[in-house]
Image (cartoon, rainbow, N blue to C red):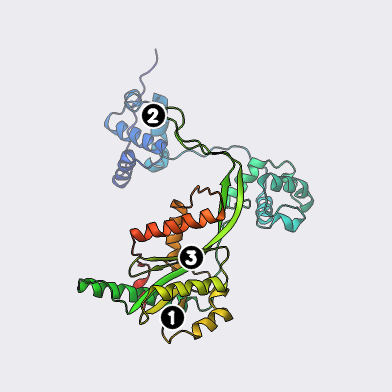
Amino acid sequence: MAAWRQAMELAIGEQDLVAVAAIARSRTEPASRVERARMLLAYREDPSFFAVGQAVGVHHQTVQRCVERALVYGAMAALEDRPRPGREPTISAEAKTWVVNLACRKAKELGYPHEMWTTRLLARHAREHGPVEGHACLARLAQGTLVSILNEQEIKPHKVRYYLERRDPEFKQKMAEVLCVYREVKLIKETAAAAKQKPNDAVAIVSYDEKPGIQAIATTAPDLPPVLGRAATFARDHEYKRQGTVSLLAGIDLLTGQVHALVRDRHRSREFIEFLKLLDAAYPAHTAIKLILDNHSAHISKETRTWLAEQPAGRFEFTFTPKHGSWLNLVEGFFSKLARSVLRHIRVASKQELKDRIMAAMDEFNRYPVVHTWSYKLDQAA
């Protein structure tokens, strides 16, 4: 007759008991640690492997092994997985380092036509050249193993992440000048709001830029409308015909929300001067017109400077954004809105139709003008 199994007394220190209880209630700890913590706590209340196994939902031998480990190594150590021997790694640390260093070079540097590595190409290169470099363990390197090696070091040689190098040594100074203009806009608005009046016409502040390369694309077959119960969207033939491109020259009055725009085939100095003439005609003669714009060659060309010199003193004032600082120009947000609404999926029969529809969109925007506001880093403006 089998002897009765004698219950083992499990003593857990006060500090460990608090920690085990917290783990047993945790929603973020690994499930294995939570389960073992519950087993230890349940066994302290009822020292029966069978009863605890039924309560927790595990085999009684699992409970017994957990309790025995707690008695030998301590309660906290019993919650952890025991190390398993496994198979000795076949790829040495030196070989992994060689592979990682290889991944940090471009494939084209080693004579391949590829600009960047693919994991398949990198694995093949390691198999072919690793043994020659003294890493015989790489002779049978699998693509999946290579990916694991790279993931350990968080290296992804097949991907490119773009960055923007700040090439303008006067970036901060120019940014401060732009922010000062935006601060002036804010003060004018606040003054007008306090007086319950519209901003006066002493100054007009316009955010200006060009949007070149707007494609005039024509369909080769009619679009098919949605059909109830059969087609939820418009259907369009995948073929199309290019009709050329146009450029939009646009500026937003930051005090009124009024959009001033021209659509031309190009955006040279002559088109920019035409836009300036448009602004000149749009505002009273005594209004100082301040423009925020980038350093495009047309904005600083000899033709533009000659035309500006012929204008009354103080009529036009330019504030240039720093190089690679187009995000400082509010009109970029307007262009984004235009691209996402009017220009999205647009199809036209000719360039002239595209020009007409863009100008019609400008009229629509001006029917419901939106006064754009800049707030980022505005408190840093002097």
Q: Position of residue 92 (x, y in %)?
A: 67, 48
Q: Residue at x 31, y 72 (%)?
A: 186
Q: Position of residue 123 (x, y in %)?
A: 70, 45
Looking at the picture, tell me which residue is in the foreground, 235 or 51: 235
- Between disc 3 and disc 1, the foreground one is 3
Q: Secondary structure at mark 2?
A: helix
- Residue 316: mark: 1
Disc 2 designates what residue? 63
Q: Residue at x 20, y 73 (%)?
A: 194
- Residue 294: mark: none
130 vs 239, left or right, is: right
Q: Position of residue 231 (x, y in %)?
A: 46, 31
Question: Which of the two discs, 1 and 2, labels the residue nearer the N terminus?
Answer: 2
Residue 382 higher or lower than 196, as above or below = below
- Between disc 1 and disc 2, the foreground one is 1
Cα distance between the residues tagged 3 and 1: 19 Å
Quadrant in which the C terminus is drawn: bottom left
Q: Secondary structure at mark 1?
A: strand
Q: Is residue 167 visible?
A: no
Residue 13 higher or lower than 200, as above or below = above
Cα distance between the residues tagged 1 and 2: 84 Å
Residue type at mark 1?
Phe
Residue type at mark 2?
Val
| Residue 56 found in image quarter | top left
Disc 3 designates what residue? 262
Residue type at mark 3?
Leu
Q: Position of residue 377 (x, y in %)?
A: 37, 70
